[in-house]
Image (cartoon, rainbow, N blue to C red):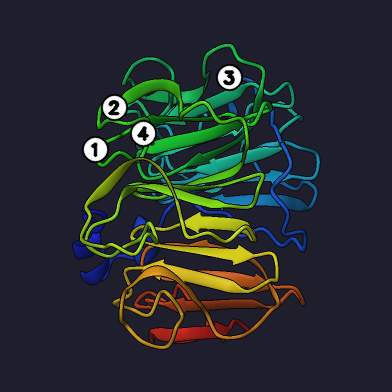
Amino acid sequence: MGRLVEMLARGGRAAAVAALAMTVSLGLSLGPASAVSAAMESGAGATVLTGGGPWIKVTAGVGFHTCGIQSDHTLWCWGYNLYGQLGVGDTVNRDVPTQVGTATTWASVTAGYYYTCGIRTDHTLWCWGNNLTGQLGVGDTVNRDVPSQVGTATTWASVTAGSSHSCGIRTDHTLWCWGNNLTGQLGVGDTVNRDVPTQVGTATTWASVTAGTFHSCGIRKSHRLWCWGNNFPWGQLGLGDPQSPRRLLPQQVGTATTWASVNAGDSHTCGIQSDYTLWCWGYNPDGELGVGDTTPRDVPTQVGTATTWASVTAGYSYTCGIRTHHTLWCWGFNHEGQLGVGDTIRRYSPIRVG
């Protein structure tokens, strides 16, 4: 189920086209992410980048588009714009960073499959772009070409955009998901789509969450890892039973209480534990797990023996991570050169970029 874009990638289209929304953040703290928020004005026009300060955040979506935040907390997007995922009020592509509105209060942004979401400094949530399955959370399935506020809550701390579903955590540490729910990736106990944020259980202990193609994972304040959604047939939930097709509610992954971060890809997942070790599991035909072979794993499996991993991001059949000494490493599918190592040869173990 999670490989619906495989023919595109195998046919020569960039594998990153179907990569999940991701941001590689260079940071050395492996504790649960602290609450962040962002701001932007809806309906504003677009300004082409002519200068500006340093970039502080970037997110690459699954719809040929990219967004970033500069040090003055302005938001900029560029790339493909068929569904209005750039948020600039039209559906015209941009080949240079283009400012979204005029707000100078952005702190976070996440790009999904032809859509984008972000949080304002007043802790309000905004989404725009493709809305076929209600992934914008605005109560309908109509596309938006400018940021639209999601409800009226002023308690959003973080948000993650997947392929066609979104999840977020509020300041009270409750977890909410919305959008496509074909395989239970919303974690609400059924397979019915939601077009508004819907609370996942009643727990008030969620620290972080990541949305993949058809599965999601999150870490609680106890540093325990939980995953839900599609699990068949590669075991990307890490529960040890790949033939079980899905989980409709969050399921604890093992018994470890040392998980620091997790990132859900298309059909594989990777996470870092508090000792800075890296672990991956799920589908592995191109070596995207980094364990030296192409055998899938249905439980978290350590990648090498290094204890220096700071962050990791899982894409479509490939993975990249940053170590504590600020070096970049990638592995997996490399048909379009997405590993950045100067060729198009896939790698089954992490290889340093530059």
* Circles 2 and 4 in contact, beta carbons < 8 Å: no
Q: Nearer the viewer, residue 328 or 234?
A: 234
Q: Earlier in the sequence, mark 3 or mark 2?
A: 3
Q: Position of residue 9 (x, y in %)?
A: 27, 66
Tag nearer the camera, 1 or 4: 1
Q: Nearer the viewer, residue 299 or 142?
A: 299
**Which residue is rendered at x = 44% and y = 36% of the image?**
166
Q: Earlier in the sequence, mark 2 or mark 4?
A: 4
Tag nearer the camera, 2 or 4: 2
Q: Which mark is residue 182?
A: 1
Q: Position of residue 46 (x, y in %)?
A: 59, 31
**Which residue is rendered at x = 44% and y = 26% of the image?**
145
Is residue 98 at least partly visible in the picture? no
Q: Nearer the viewer, residue 41 or 158?
A: 158
SS for callout 2: loop
SS for callout 4: loop
Q: Which mark is residue 306?
A: none
* Circles 1 and 3 in contact, beta carbons < 8 Å: no
SS for callout 1: loop
Identify the residue position indicated by label 2 in the image: 193
SS for callout 3: loop
For badge 3, the amino acid type reads Ser
* Circles 1 and 4 in contact, beta carbons < 8 Å: no
Q: Which mark is residue 42?
A: 3
Q: Position of residue 75 (x, y in %)?
A: 66, 37
Q: Quadrant of the C terminus?
A: bottom right
Tag nearer the camera, 1 or 3: 1
Distance between mark 1 and mark 4 Cα atoms: 22 Å
Q: Earlier in the sequence, mark 1 or mark 2?
A: 1
Q: Earlier in the sequence, mark 4 or mark 3?
A: 3
Identify the residue position indicated by label 4 in the image: 83
